[in-house]
Image: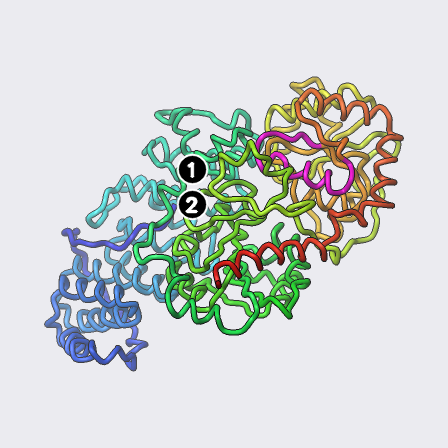
C-alpha cells in the first residue's frame, strides 16, 4: 500500500488561470559530475530562457534521477517553473504536470515540505487533480501530520465531485488512497476503521493481494473470528493464499503451509541478483583476510525496544572481543530508550543503513568483510530480504526474528536446538540447523525489574487461581480460547488475566467468553506498562497459559525468569515448539503437552491443586536462574564455536 508514482505522460486538463508564485531556486550552486556538466549547463540555460519543451524536461529529469542526481532533477524543474511563471508561455496543463513531477522528485530526495508546496500549487491549478492530492497526503505523512494526510486521501476516495487524473486509472488512484489511509490507521492502532477501508478497497478491486494480507492480519489483531471472512468477490481461497507468513504462523501448525506462505513471498518480492555472490568479490575477500578476528554482523531493524532487542542485548556484550569483531547493520528506529543506547554501545561498529537501498547496503556488508551475517528479521514487518539475496557474507544465518523457515535465497543456516527443529521438521526448511546444546534462545540477565505489585493493583482476586496469557492478541485463535474457557469452567474461582492490546480484541474476547458459558467478568485485562513493570507483574499469576500454534518466545523467557510456570502445547513446527524448548532447558518438561486435550487436562489439574503451581514457583525461584536456559555466557560460547567453524571453513 504505497503512494502513487509520478505521472509518466501528459493529457489535456481543463485550463484555469493561475498565479504561479514560485520561490527562488534553492540549489543554484549544485554541481554535477564532470562528464554531465556541459549538458547540465545547457539544460539549465534552456530552462531559464523557456526553450526547453516539457517532454524533454521530463526525459532529462528521469535521466538525472536514474543517475542518483535527484537534486539536479529537482533544480531543473524548479528553474523551468520559475521561467514559466515569469513568461506565462506554457499552458496550465503543462505547468500542472511539471509541478507534479517536481513534487515527486522532491519527495524522493526527502524534501517533504517543499514537495508539499509543489503539490499545493498543482492543486491551485486543478483542485480535483487526484494524483497530486494522493501524493500530498504522502508528504504530510512524512512530516508526521497524520490527520492532514488522512484528510488528503479522504478527499480522493470520498469526494462526490468528479476527479481528474493524468495518464492513470482513476479507480486505481481511489484504491491507493484507501490503502494508504488503511495502512496509517493500522499503524495508529485504529484497527476497525482501517479494516473498513480495506473492505472498501477490495470491494472496488478484489485482486489486491497485499491488501488481503493486511485484512487477514488486522482481523487476527482484533481477535475477530473467523479470521477468514470472505465478502464481495473476495473468496476464502484468495484470503488463504494472500496470508503473510507471520499471520500463517498464528493460523496453522502445518509446516508445509508455513513453507508455502514463505515461498509465495520470496517468489513475489525477493530479487534474484545476477552479479553473483558479493562475498566472492576481491574487495570482500581481502577485507575478511585482514586481521585474525572473525567478523560477525547482525542485520536488523529491531535493535530497539522490541522483543529481539530485549532478548539479545547481553549476547552482543558477551562476545569474546579477542576472537570476534561485532558489527550491526541497522535500520532500527531511534526510540530514545536506554535499551537502544545499550544495544548500540555493545557493538564494535554500527552501520546505519536506513537511507541505503538494499544493493548498496549489501555492498557495504561485503566490503566490510563480514564472515557471518546473522539475520534477525526474517520475513517479519520491516524486513529487507533483498540484502541477503546479494549474499554479502559467506555464512548467512537466520536467528530469533522469524522462528520458521523463510526460504530466503542466501540464508543457509538457522540457529536452533533439537527440540525446536526435530528431524521430521527439517524437510520443510531451506535452512540447515545449527544445533545449540541446550536451547536456541538467548536472554538478558541484566533486565531491570520494577517494584513487586499486589494483585489488588491489577484487580486480581487474592484467593482465586489466576491463569494468565500476555501473548499478543494476534497469536490467539478460536480453538485455544475455547480451551481456555473450558479450563475456567472446570476450575472454580479462577480468572484469566490477558493483555488488553486493543479495545476491539477486548470486546470480541468478552463476547466469545459469554458464548462459551463463562462470565466475561472472569476475564481481567492488563494494560501495557513499561518493561520493568511488565516483568514485575509476572510474579502475580499462578500459571501462564501458552498460545498455539504461535508459542510464547520472549514472553515465556520473561515469565520463567520471574519464577512463574508456563504450560505449553508443542506441535510440528519450530514456532509451536519454542516454549517447549525453554521449558526443557529450565528443567520443567512436564509442563509440555502435545495435544489440546492433554493441555486442557494438565491446566485443570494444576488449577485444582494450587500447591502444584506453588511447587513450580519454588523450583524456578531456587533453580531456574541457574539452569542452562539462563546460562547466557555458555550459550554465547556455543554460538561462537559454531560461527567460528563455519567462518574458518570459508576462509580456508
Name the secondary structure under disc 2: helix
The residue sitting at 85% across, 43% down in the picture is: 454
Q: Nearer the viewer, residue 19 or 483?
A: 483
* Numbered range of the magenta stretch: 568-588
Q: Is residue 104 visible?
A: yes
Is residue 601 in the magenta section? no
The residue sitting at 29% across, 76% down in the picture is: 24
Classify 490 as above or below 585. above
Classify 553 as above or below 546. below
Callout 1–callout 2 Cβ contact below 8 Å: yes
Residue 180, given in percent of the width and then of the height, sits at 40, 46
Q: Nearer the viewer, residue 466 or 406?
A: 406
Residue 105, given in percent of the width and then of the height, sits at 30, 63
Is residue 581 in the magenta section? yes
Q: Which residue is under mark 1?
A: 197
Q: Earlier in the sequence, mark 1 or mark 2?
A: 2
Q: Is residue 507 visible?
A: no
Residue 349: give its label.
none
Label 2 crowd bin: few (<14), some (14–19), many (20+), radius 10 Å: many
Residue 121, given in percent of the width and then of the height, sits at 29, 61
Residue 292, given in percent of the width and then of the height, sits at 56, 71
Residue 247 vs residue 20: left or right?
A: right
Label 1 crowd bin: few (<14), some (14–19), many (20+), radius 10 Å: many
Q: Looking at the rendering, which quadrant does residue 503 occupy? A: top right
The residue sitting at 21% across, 69% down in the picture is: 81
Name the secondary structure under disc 1: helix
Classify 64 as above or below 448. below
Residue 235 vs residue 87: left or right?
A: right
Q: Which residue is under mark 2?
A: 181
Kindly report the distance in space between the C-alpha atoms of the residues bearing marks 1 and 2: 8 Å
Residue 321 vs residue 239: left or right?
A: right
Amino acid at each position: 500500500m504505497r503512494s502513487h508514482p509520478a505521472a509518466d505522460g501528459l493529457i489535456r486538463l481543463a485550463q484555469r488561470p493561475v498565479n504561479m508564485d514560485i520561490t527562488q531556486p534553492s540549489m543554484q550552486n549544485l554541481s554535477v559530475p564532470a562528464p554531465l556538466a556541459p549538458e547540465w549547463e545547457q539544460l539549465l540555460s534552456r530552462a531559464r530562457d523557456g526553450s526547453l519543451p516539457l517532454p524533454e524536461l521530463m526525459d532529462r529529469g528521469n535521466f538525472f534521477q536514474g543517475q542518483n542526481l535527484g537534486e539536479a532533477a529537482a533544480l531543473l524543474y524548479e528553474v523551468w517553473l520559475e521561467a514559466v511563471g515569469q513568461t506565462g508561455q506554457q499552458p496550465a496543463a503543462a505547468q500542472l504536470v511539471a509541478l507534479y513531477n517536481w513534487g515527486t522528485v522532491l519527495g524522493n530526495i526527502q524534501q517533504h515540505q517543499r514537495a508539499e508546496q509543489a503539490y499545493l500549487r498543482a492543486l491551485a491549478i486543478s483542485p480535483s487533480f487526484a494524483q497530486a492530492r494522493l501524493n500530498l497526503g504522502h508528504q504530510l505523512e512524512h512530516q508526521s501530520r497524520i490527520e492532514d494526510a488522512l484528510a488528503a486521501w479522504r478527499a480522493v476516495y470520498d469526494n462526490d465531485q468528479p476527479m481528474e487524473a493524468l495518464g492513470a486509472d482513476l479507480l486505481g488512484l481511489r484504491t491507493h488512497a484507501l490503502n494508504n489511509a488503511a495502512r496509517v490507521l493500522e499503524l495508529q492502532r485504529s484497527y476497525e476503521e482501517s479494516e473498513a477501508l480495506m473492505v472498501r478497497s477490495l470491494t472496488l478491486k478484489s485482486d489486491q493481494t497485499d491488501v488481503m494480507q493486511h485484512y487477514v492480519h488486522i482481523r487476527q489483531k482484533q481477535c475477530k473470528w473467523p479470521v477468514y471472512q470472505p465478502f464481495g468477490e473476495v473468496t476464502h481461497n484468495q484470503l488463504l493464499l494472500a496470508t503473510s507468513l507471520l499471520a500463517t504462523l498464528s493460523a496453522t501448525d502445518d509446516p508445509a503451509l508455513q513453507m508455502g506462505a514463505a515461498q509465495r513471498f520470496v517468489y513475489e518480492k525477493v530479487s534474484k541478483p545476477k552479479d553473483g555472490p558479493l562475498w566472492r568479490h576481491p574487495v570482500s575477500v581481502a577485507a575478511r583476510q585482514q586481521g585474525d578476528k572473525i567478523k560477525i554482523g547482525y542485520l536488523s531493524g529491531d535493535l530497539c525496544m522490541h522483543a529481539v532487542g530485549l532478548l539479545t542485548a547481553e549476547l552482543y556484550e558477551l562476545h569474546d572481543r579477542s576472537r570476534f569483531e561485532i558489527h550491526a547493520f541497522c535500520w532500527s528506529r531511534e526510540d530514545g530508550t536506554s535499551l537502544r543506547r545499550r544495544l548500540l554501545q555493545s557493538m564494535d561498529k554500527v552501520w546505519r543503513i536506513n537511507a541505503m537501498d538494499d544493493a548498496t547496503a549489501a555492498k557495504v556488508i561485503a566490503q566490510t568483510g563480514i564472515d557471518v551475517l546473522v539475520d534477525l528479521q526474517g520475513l517479519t514487518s520491516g524486513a529487507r530480504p533483498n540484502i541477503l539475496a546479494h549474499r554479502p557474507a559467506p555464512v548467512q544465518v537466520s536467528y530469533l526474528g522469524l522462528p520458521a523457515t523463510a526460504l530466503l535465497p542466501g540464508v543457509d543456516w538457522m540457529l536452533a536446538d533439537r527440540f525446536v527443529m526435530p528431524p521430521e521438521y527439517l524437510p520443510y526448511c531451506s535452512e540447515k540447523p545449527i544445533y545449540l546444546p541446550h536451547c536456541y534462545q538467548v536472554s538478558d540477565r541484566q533486565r531491570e525489574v520494577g517494584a513487586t505489585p499486589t494483585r489488588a493493583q491489577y484487580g486480581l482476586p487474592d484467593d482465586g487461581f489466576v491463569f494468565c496469557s500476555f501473548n499478543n492478541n494476534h497469536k490467539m485463535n478460536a480453538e485455544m480460547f475455547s480451551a481456555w474457557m473450558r479450563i475456567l469452567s472446570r476450575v472454580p474461582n479462577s480468572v484469566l488475566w490477558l493483555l488488553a492490546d486493543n479495545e476491539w480484541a477486548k470486546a470480541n474476547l468478552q463476547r466469545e467468553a459469554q458464548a462459551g458459558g463463562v462470565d466475561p467478568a472472569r476475564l481481567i485485562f492488563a494494560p501495557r506498562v513499561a518493561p520493568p513493570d511488565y516483568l514485575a507483574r509476572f510474579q502475580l499469576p499462578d500459571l501462564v497459559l501458552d498460545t498455539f500454534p504461535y508459542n510464547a518466545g520472549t514472553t515465556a523467557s520473561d515469565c520463567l525468569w520471574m519464577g512463574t510456570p508456563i504450560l505449553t502445547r508443542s506441535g510440528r513446527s519450530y514456532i509451536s515448539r519454542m516454549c517447549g524448548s525453554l521449558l526443557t532447558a529450565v528443567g520443567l518438561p512436564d509442563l509440555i503437552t502435545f495435544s489440546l486435550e492433554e493441555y486442557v487436562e494438565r491446566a485443570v489439574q494444576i488449577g485444582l491443586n494450587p500447591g502444584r503451581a506453588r511447587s513450580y514457583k519454588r523450583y524456578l525461584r531456587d533453580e531456574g536462574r541457574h539452569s542452562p536456559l539462563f546460562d547466557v555466557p555458555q550459550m554465547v560460547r556455543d554460538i561462537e564455536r559454531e560461527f567460528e567453524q563455519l567462518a574458518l571453513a570459508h576462509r580456508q
